[in-house]
Image (cartoon, rainbow, N blue to C red):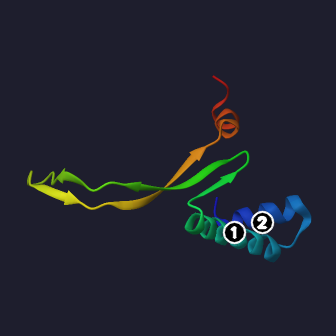
């Protein structure tokens, strides 16, 4: 689904205009960015957790030449789905 499709769905379901739905989605996106920058994690009930994770510097290998290269440390974003989301999408195991 695209952002426009999500905004259209929300406007029909909640009874607000498309412009208000789009504004709400943009505000949610900016909230996620702000919290990840400040706190490093954001938990959305029923969906999961967004986290910043640091990876260490390590040695890697260029697959084309076999030459060893140094891979620098960096920060990555991770999303861990909640149990409720997994069960809803995949079914209970």
Residue labelled with disc 2: 8
Residue neighbourhood size for the residue with mark 1, other residues' Cα within 10 Å, grouped as few (<14), some (14–19), many (≥20): some
User: Which secondary structure, mark 1?
Assistant: helix
Q: Kindly indicate the quadrant of the structure image that contains residue 70.
A: bottom left
- Residue sitting farthest toward the right: 15
Q: In the drawing, does residue 3 fall left or right of residue 60?
A: right
- Residue sitting farthest toward the top: 93
Q: In the drawing, does residue 53 fall left or right of residue 56?
A: right
**Image position, residue 43 (x, y; %):** 67, 52
- Residue sitting farthest toward the front: 39
Q: CA distance from mark 2 to mark 1?
A: 6 Å
Q: Nearer the viewer, residue 89 or 72?
A: 72
Q: Nearer the viewer, residue 52 or 48?
A: 52
Whether the residues at callouts 2 and 1 have beta carbons within 8 Å, the answer is: yes
User: Which secondary structure, mark 2?
Assistant: helix
Image quadrant holding the C terminus, namely top right
Q: Nearer the viewer, residue 40 or 14?
A: 40
Q: Nearer the viewer, residue 5 or 86?
A: 86
Residue labelled with disc 1: 4
**Image position, residue 51 (x, y; %):** 54, 54
**Image position, residue 22 (x, y; %):** 74, 72
Q: Kindly indicate the quadrant of the structure image that contains residue 24.
A: bottom right
């Amino acid at each position: 689904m695209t952002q426009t499709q999500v905004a259209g769905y929300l406007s029909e379901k909640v009874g607000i205009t498309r412009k208000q739905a789009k504004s709400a989605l943009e505000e949610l996106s900016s909230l996620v960015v702000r919290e990840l920058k400040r706190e490093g994690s954001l938990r959305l009930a029923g969906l999961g957790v967004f986290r910043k994770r640091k990876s260490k510097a390590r040695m890697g290998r260029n697959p084309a030449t076999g030459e060893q290269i140094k891979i620098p440390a960096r920060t990555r974003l991770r999303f861990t789905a909640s149990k409720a989301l997994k069960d809803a999408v995949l079914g209970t195991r």
